[in-house]
Image (cartoon, rainbow, N blue to C red):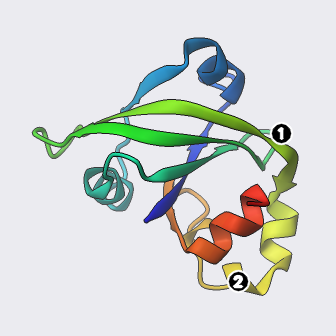
């Protein structure tokens, strides 16, 4: 499974992840987002999406390890991937039919969103 992780750049941006190389993705409170974090497996691919004024997918990362021993606060270690060749805006996502049933469009507040292989390819250009 591939996932999209939303982040507020003023709190932790993709540039911060580039600087740090790895980070622990935690502090999520939405029950559905928590379920997705607990389900992650090492090696799975991630798209980093910046909210706020950017509202666009900006880079990639991957899951290094998952500690789901505390179901209410799973800790997922991620490592930096690459900057996308071009940021993909929320408007572009909403305009593409492959996202019509996606929680990215239907549940705007969800911070961890599963992606199909096709959705991942669209966002990353891979």
- What secondary structure is found at the residue carrying circle 2? helix
Can you see residue 11? no
Q: Quadrant of residue 29?
A: top left
Percent x, y of residue 68: 17, 43
Instruction: Identify residue for label 2.
Output: 98
Q: Position of residue 31 (x, y in %)?
A: 30, 57
If you read the primary sequence from the N terminus, does the residue marked by circle 1 or circle 2 appear first?
A: 1
Farthest-out residue, top: 19
Where disc 1 sits, the SS reads: loop
Is residue 87 visible to us here? yes
- Give the position of the N terminus as an image quadrant: bottom left
Q: Which residue is mark 1?
A: 53
Image spot of residue 15 (x, y percent): 71, 22
Q: Residue at x 73, y 60 (%)?
A: 126
Give left or right: position of 67 versus 95.
Answer: left
For marks 1 and 2, give the CA distance.
Answer: 24 Å
Front residue of 50 and 98? 98
Corner quadrant of residue 90: bottom right
Residue drawn at 79 percent across, 73 percent down: 94
User: Which residue appears at 66% of the width and 71% of the height?
Assistant: 119
Give left or right: position of 33 versus 22: left
Left or right: 58 with respect to 117?
A: right
């Amino acid at each position: 499974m591939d996932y999209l992780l939303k982040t507020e750049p003023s709190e932790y941006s993709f540039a911060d992840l580039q600087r740090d190389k790895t980070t622990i993705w935690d502090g999520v409170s939405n029950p559905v987002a928590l379920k997705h974090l607990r389900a992650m497996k090492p090696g799975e691919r991630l798209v980093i999406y910046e909210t706020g004024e950017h509202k666009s997918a900006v880079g990639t990362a991957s899951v290094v390890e998952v500690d789901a021993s505390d179901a209410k606060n799973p800790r997922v270690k991620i490592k930096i991937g690459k900057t996308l060749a071009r940021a993909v805006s929320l408007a572009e996502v909403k305009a593409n039919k492959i996202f019509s049933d996606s929680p990215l469009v239907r549940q705007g507040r969800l911070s961890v969103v599963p992606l199909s292989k096709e959705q991942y390819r669209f966002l990353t250009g891979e």
